[in-house]
Structures are given as C-alpha cells and as structure tokens.
Image (cartoon, coloured by chain):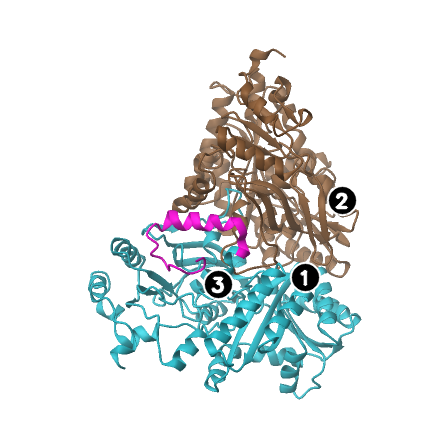
Chain colours: A cyan, B brown
Amino acid sequence: MSPDLIRPADPALADALTTIFPADRLSATIPDRIAYARDLWPMGQFWARQGVFPHPPDAIVWPEAVGEIVALLRLANARRFPVIPMGAGSGVCGGTLAHRGGVILDLKRMKRVRHLDEASLLVTAEAGIIGQHLEEWLNGRGYTLGHFPSSIYCSSFGGWIATRSAGQLSTKYGKIEDMVMGIEGVLPDGTVFASKVSPRTAAGPRLDQLLVGSEGTLAVITAATARVRPVAEARRFAGYVYEDVHAGLEAIRKVMRQGLDPAAVRLYDETDTALSLSALGLDATGCLLVLVFEDVAGLCDVKADLADAICRAGGGRALGPGPGEHWFKHRYDISYKQSHVYQAGMMVDTIEVATTWSNLDRLYDAMRASIGERMTCLAHFSHVYPEGGSIYFTFVGPPGEEGDIETYRSVWNDAMNACVKMGATITHHHGVGLLKAPWMKDEHGPLIEMYHAVKRALDPNNILNPGKLVP
Amino acid sequence: MSPDLIRPADPALADALTTIFPADRLSATIPDRIAYARDLWPMGQFWARQGVFPHPPDAIVWPEAVGEIVALLRLANARRFPVIPMGAGSGVCGGTLAHRGGVILDLKRMKRVRHLDEASLLVTAEAGIIGQHLEEWLNGRGYTLGHFPSSIYCSSFGGWIATRSAGQLSTKYGKIEDMVMGIEGVLPDGTVFASKVSPRTAAGPRLDQLLVGSEGTLAVITAATARVRPVAEARRFAGYVYEDVHAGLEAIRKVMRQGLDPAAVRLYDETDTALSLSALGLDATGCLLVLVFEDVAGLCDVKADLADAICRAGGGRALGPGPGEHWFKHRYDISYKQSHVYQAGMMVDTIEVATTWSNLDRLYDAMRASIGERMTCLAHFSHVYPEGGSIYFTFVGPPGEEGDIETYRSVWNDAMNACVKMGATITHHHGVGLLKAPWMKDEHGPLIEMYHAVKRALDPNNILNPGKLVP
C-alpha cells in the first residue's frame, strides 16, 4: 500500500511507546493504521469508495495489563496525544475514529473471564472479551448474560458498556446498563479504580454508571462485573399478523402492562413485514409481530398463554411459532449485510430512537416522513418496556445528486431534528460517537454541564477520545 | 420559648427573603426554627434530652413555584448563604440539618400530581407531595407506584429521589432509582432543567441519575416522572420457619434465582423472630421467613406455588399466610416507635447495608459481632435481589458510661468500619447525610472525584446543602 494514502504518523510517538509496549503489541505500520482508520459507521464505506482513509491513528497498542494502560495515559498526558479505547470496532457512529490522531488502545488482548460468582449470579470479565466468547463461556457453566446484540460475534464486553448496548432479548434481560454491577478501569490521569459491587446502594449517586455510555471519553474500562442468569429451561415462540402498526403496538403495550415478561418483542411495519414474510413464503400483508418467551419450565407457557389471549383479542391472526423461529435462527445476520449494499453503489444505515408508548405512533409517523423524503424507509419496533419502546428504522437508497456523503448527512440531520422535535431520545442503543454528537445538547439540556464538569476534572488535557460524544 | 435556646438568626437574611416570599410562606420565628432544627436522626433525640437545638436554620421558606426557587438560589449565591432542600423531614441521617445555618427550602407546598400517562404507565408529580397522598391518588385511578417505605405517611416523593429510597415491595417494584424516568429541578445557579423521559437511552450516561441520591447537594428537585403499575389483581402471603439464618437465606436465594418475582421477602434472625412470632402467639424458635406475591391473577398463584416448593425443600416449616398478613397490617408502624425508647432513657437506631449473596452471611456475622459489643442487636434481611440483598440491623441499649452521644457514635463507627472491611455498601436505602459521610471515600474510591467535579462546577459557592453527603 502506498504510504501517501494516509498522513504520516508521528515517529517520535511510536518511539516513545516502545518504552511501554513490546514490538509485537505496538504497531505504526500503514496497513495497521488503515485497518484501524474505520469502524462500521457507513461513512467508512463512502471514504473507501473514494479511496481515502482520513482518520488513521498514529499507532495502535494492544495492552495485556492494567499497568501498561496506566503508563500509556501518563505518557499521553505528558506529550498531549489522544488515546482512543477500542473494543472490537463494531460501532456504527464513528466513536473510535482517530480523527485527531493519537493512539488506538485496542483492548482485545485483555479478555479473561476472571470470576463467576454462581451464588450471586455475577460474572467478572475483562473488557476486551468478544461477546460471543463470554456468552459461550457462561453457557458452558449453565448461565447466560442475556445480552445478544446482532454484533455479538464482533463486539466486546467493554464496548457494550461504553456505548450502552442493547441485546435482542433486552425486554427480559435489560440493556447493558441494567446488567452492569461494577466497573474497573483507569481514569485519564492513570488512576486505577474499581467500583463496589452491591445489588443496590443509597450511598449517593452510582458514580460508575456515569461511565456506562461514556464512549471512552471519561475512563478506560478494563473489566466489569455483570449479572448473569441461569440458562432458561424453556423457550416459546409466537407470531401474529396485525392490520397495521397501531394495532400491533396496542397488543404489545397490553402484554407489557400485565408484566408478562417476554424475552423479545418485535413488530415489523408493512414494508419490513413484506420482506420478512416473503422470505417465509407467507402472505405478506399487514404487520408481523414476533414474541419470544424464555423462563423456568413452570412459568414459560403460563406467560405465553396469557400473552396469546391478549394478542388474539387485539385482532392478531396467529401464525404459530414459524416466524419467531425463523427470526431466531437468523438473528445475527443483519450485522454482516451492509457492505453488499454499498458495493452495489447504494447506501444503507439504521436509526434507532426510543420514546414512551403515548408518543410512539407519532414518533414513527414523523420520522418515517422525514427519512422517506429521500430514502426507502422500513422499520420495526423492538426493545420494548412497560413505559415505551424503540423504533429501528432502516433507510436504503441511491447517493443522489448531492453526492453520497452530503445525501447521507442530510438524511441524518432531518431524522435527528424530527426526533428531537418529538421529544424522543436520539439513540436507544447504538450510541453517539461523532455522528450524533451535535444533538447531545438538545438531548440533555442544562444537565450536559454535569458531563463537561466531569470531563474537565478527570481529563484536563483532553487526551481520552477527544471530540467524541459531546462536542 | 426562650430566645436564648438557639443562636440568633441573621435579621438581614430574613429581610432579603421578603423580596421573594410573602409573609405567610417565610418564617424566622424561634418555634419554626426549632421545629426545623432536626429530622429523625436519633442525634436529635440526644440533643432534645440535653435541651439544645444546635442546628437551627436562619429561616424557612415554602415556595409554591419554580420561579421562587430560582430567585432564592440567585440570592443565596449573591449573599453566600446555604439553602437546604427538604421534603417531609423523615430522614434518619441528618441530611437536612442546617448545621451551617442558612435557609430551609421546604417543598411540601409543591405537591400537585401533574399528569398520569396511562398508556405509558408514567406519573409526573411535584417533589413535595407526601408519599401516601401520591399512592392514594394513583390507587383511585387503578395504579400504584409500588413504593412503600415505612415512612410513607411522613416522607415525600422528592425526598425519596434525593435519598435513593426503597419501599417494602422493592424486590418486585425496584428502588426509587429504578422507578425515576425523568427529573425536573433547579441547578444551584438558578438554571431550570427537565431531563428527557424515555424508557431507555444510549445518548451518553443518564445524567439525571446523578441526582438520585444527591441529597439536595447538586440540585433542587422540583418534580419527577416515575413509572407506575396497575394495582395487582392478586396477592398471596406465605410464612416459613427455618432452623437458622443460613437455611433461610439459601431458600430466598433459590427463589430469586428462578425469577419468581416475589413482591416482598423478609427473613428475621433468631432474635427478631422471637419478637415477631411471640406477637402472634406462635412458637418463637428459629428464623421466620415471610413472602408476599402480587401479580395478575393468572400468575400470582403459579409463582407462589413454585416458590413454596423451593421453600419447603430447603427445610422450611410452612406457617401459612398468618405471619405475612400480620406483617402487612403493621408494616408502617416501625417509623413511629423510636421516641418511646428514647423517652425510656435508652437509644435505638437502625443500620441497613447490602452486599452480594456470596458475602451476605459473612457480612451478617461481622456486623452483628461489631454492633453486639455494646448493644442488643437484631436483624432482618429484606430488599433482596437475584444478586444479593440488604440486612437491616436494629440496635437497642443504654447510653453507657461514655454518655449517649459518644456511645452512639462508637457503635456507628465500629459498624461502618466492619461494613467497609467486608466490601459491602454502607447504606441500602437510608442515605448518607451527616452520619455516614465519613465513609463515602471508602465507598467510592477514586470515582468520588466525579462527584466533587460536578459539585464544584454546578455549585462553586457551595450554597446547596453544604457539608452533606461527601465531606
């Protein structure tokens, strides 16, 4: 690869890093710098199309011990270079791009499962372990984390925490912020910390929760303790078709209101349903609802039967377990389909927002109208809670006359502005990164000063993932 | 009352407050200043015994609108006097004492229920509403907050949030931090804020959660949105006796592990059981376990039956619903029994800590040994979770030779040091106040700097409840 593809790295920086990292865990080569110049943010696809790699790091390091991270952060403060913590690079918002240069701190070598406390249903693992590896380790001992993002094969435990990730069974098991019971890490000045693990506390605010969603800007998360559950004894699928989105949402809301505790709930709008059902060779009109129940044997069927009565009473035509089983079998496929669309010269991305039940229909209409101005738009509702849920929009379309990057930015600008106008949160589980940072002030209002205060105090030299999350 | 009972108030301060508050919502009289010179921290009993009131405020104000709070905070910054937000004064840690003088901001006139969103199961109410009033308002419409602290008749919605309160059915409905979905308030500089209400978000850390447990030091909470639930269709009680604490804890842990979702779980140690069962005229040996289930009709008995099998298999002798029904009927009495003990010349207080299941037995032994050195000690386990639970110690005894305040402080010092040594959290739901502030550094370690950073940035003049929570 030609060296002039990317800007030159700072040679003095790589030299300085050799005092901390052995040669096989430190790289400033061009192939590595290019490989680490992108995550799964579609912007990387546009850049690749143009043959540019605008945000390469100066170097990449692979620490194996907390002491190395401490030394790196001290060096970074002394020499004022950015340090960007990174898990597996599956982020879709540019959160780990080295857009101000500096060092990528790849945590994947810190991947031990340190302790399973079976009595307390708690696992402690290092941040860099790949999600599927952690899940398999737990499954082998009869447990599950209950966290199944579609990226589970290419995302890490620490990355989930840094971005407030959600898994596909979040309705039962919660999002990662519900699971995290303690965090270990290193503050920007090199101070090592470990928060106390307790089921609940009233000893002031839970300060470690400030790191959940901090996207590598406040601390390097090196390990965490999360709750686990015994693997469910029973699982049951159910599928229904509703006349429209509204009828389907009403059925879901009533199921959630009764505390029936489904593991997954997915309602596809008409367009998304047509795609989903035609894959099954089924009649493709209306809106498909899929429910999954997981529980101890004595509760699974009772809950599923109670929900079934509600779903039928709400006008749902029962389809049996087929659609749910099909979804379950293919539930991780979506994370690996993006590049085909881009290779065809098109663009595709997803926008996941959330709001309360009373606002959900209106949010769906407003954002679909906004996104649909330029793009083909489909959506499903998943990650529901008794209080509301998220909408997962997918948009697909051609670059348009403005060019791909301009078109892409316009779609996002309009969608985010519509979301803010409707009072909904700008992201349910993909996080913020560079992509959504411009709307963080709208999201948090005056309380954003709390974030700035912590950032200034912990990281006065602004070395930890600068310019991300909140501009 | 003689004016020399307490220090004189600053007359200029009361004068300045008349520019904001009408005469009937502002007081600097001695009776009012004495009435507001204590909360339910037992230290107030010792002071009353001595006939002293060491921490009177200079004045008390009763705002009815957010604008008045804004004006008060601006005045406080200009003149540098403390402002202490207060709900109903049921705190047991000295969190609302005016130990540096200043103005008590009593929020009880801001007590409207502003909105019930039945579709989203959310209620928005002002901070000063008394808990029981809010619960009755909701019950009248078919809903419950599910939050039942024993202080429910003398504590407020905002006070619950400020102190991370727990109700007696927390095992099912969660603590207040699990219920709060949005907070409105005023920052120390007078800036008004309202956090976004969303079932979940990934837009960075949830900053409003930093206020849950901030005990009036970071903001004045003026209103909040919390989740509600339909009133349960069915309730069932069960009681068992176990040979010892260990056997009882094992039964509870297995019930929680199966996801059987009891509303309340209470295990009394041998001493506490003797008191509880003798009140019922029952054989008083062993450890009493009480379970309460609440749910939709189709689930309540199923869950209770599954739990019953576990409890019997673990060696529990079934007592039927009697002990649970008796507890339920008298569940709020404890908050009103303290003063009788003090009138008899004795002292009594409670210490509630929490830890994981694997640490719970050891914590119980260590703290009971510590407290038992000077005092009669009884305990029950309640507020349990799949990961662990809390222990609620009650100590009773005579003042001793050191004098009551010295004895009291010694018991607390030893108990908190034992708790910290065991790695448990120093408080599950009573909060910190002045009483436990010395152990906050032990509790949080280096992360405490996050709290200090926010406090410094939001409240540079240190006017909002200074000297509380973190010294």
- Looking at the rendering, the stretch of residues picked out in magenta corresponds to A442-471
Q: Amino acid at mark 1?
A: Asn
The picture quadrant where one finds residue A423 is: bottom right
Residue B38 x, y percent position in the rendering: 58, 25
Q: Which residue is identified by label 3?
A: A432
Q: Chain of mark 1?
A: A
Same chain under badges 3 and 2? The reply is: no
Same chain under badges 3 and 1? The reply is: yes
Q: CA distance from mark 1 to mark 2?
A: 24 Å
| x 58%, y 28%: residue | B348
> Quadrant of the image for the C terminus of chain A?
bottom left
Residue B113 x, y percent position in the rendering: 72, 44
Q: Which residue is identified by label 1?
A: A359
First along the sequence among labels 3 and 1: 1
Question: Residue at the bottom extreme?
Answer: A281
Residue A286 x, y percent position in the rendering: 72, 79
Q: CA distance from mark 3 to mark 1?
A: 22 Å
Q: Secondary structure at mark 1?
A: helix
